[in-house]
Amino acid sequence: MIEYEHHIEKYSLLGYHMYSHMIPESEWGDKKLAKSYLEKYWLSQAVYDKEWQPIQDKIFINQEKGLPAQVFSEQYELLALRGGVLLEEVDFKELQKCMLSLGDKHFVVIENTFGGKLDEPPFRMKYPTNISWKELISGNFISSILFEMFHKEYFLFSESGVWGRYSANEYQDPLNIIGFASEYRSFFRKEIKISQQEEHELSKWLPPAYKNRIPYR
């Protein structure tokens, strides 16, 4: 069985269109397009286990808990953004500039299974860092579920292991937390834009474990 067969059969159902703003209802459920997208960008379990999970485990802790627990190892500095979805176009382009500056070749999107508690197979995706936003969202319903559905949480990181992003979409106040090694502070603080209004709002949303590591006032 192809690892992503379940994703194609389940999410092609028209009822899942309720999560989408990108795809007209009349175009939802294009299995051929979704399969082509997954053939290009799906990350197999074997490759994930061998090459990517060790990097994930270096960056992230308490993976089976998620927020409000601390999910980043202590050596990473943190920034927080409003959450709710995995990535929007502006978020992606800001993050892409950081990845390209660091020389990253690929990044991955790994759905949090909360220690295997999910009732369905998780998403695992691998993309080149120079991918366009248009291509990133070109997978019909698969892209829509990945980037718009707010019932999932994800780890996002690259092969360098010097940064990571956690999308806590299901937390009571949805947050995207970005962690990075201190020597790369300039890349991230330059490119990731946070307004004073957003900082003020986020200061009220942050769980206690993050208050001292993200000093928003």
Image: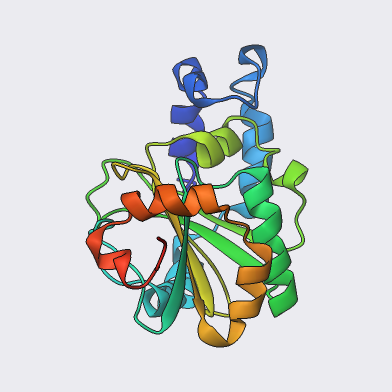
Residue 39 coordinates in the image, percent (x, y): 64, 49
- Quarter where residue 61 is shown: bottom left
Which quarter of the rendering shows the N terminus?
top left
Q: Is residue 123 above or below residue 95?
A: above
Which residue lies at the image location 37% right of the left edge and 75% below the top edge?
Answer: 57
Residue sitting nearer the eye, 197 or 163? 197
| Quarter containing the C terminus | bottom left
Q: Quadrant of residue 23?
A: top right
Residue 177: x percent and y percent?
44, 60
- Residue 26, x across and y down, in percent: 65, 12
Q: Nearer the viewer, residue 105 or 119?
A: 105
Residue at 45% in and 40% down: 84
Residue that protrudes farthest toward the bottom in the picture: 183
Q: Residue at x 40, y 84 (%)?
A: 75
Q: Position of residue 128 (x, y in %)?
A: 70, 62
> Considering depth in this image, is 107 or 88 the residue closer to the camera?
88
Q: In this view, does 143 lie to the left or right of 215?
A: right
Decide: is 162 above or below 39: below
In the rendered image of this protein, does residue 177 appear above or below residue 186? above
Residue at the spot x=37%, y=55% of the render? Answer: 203
Figure label count: 0
Viewer-nearest residue: 203 or 149: 203
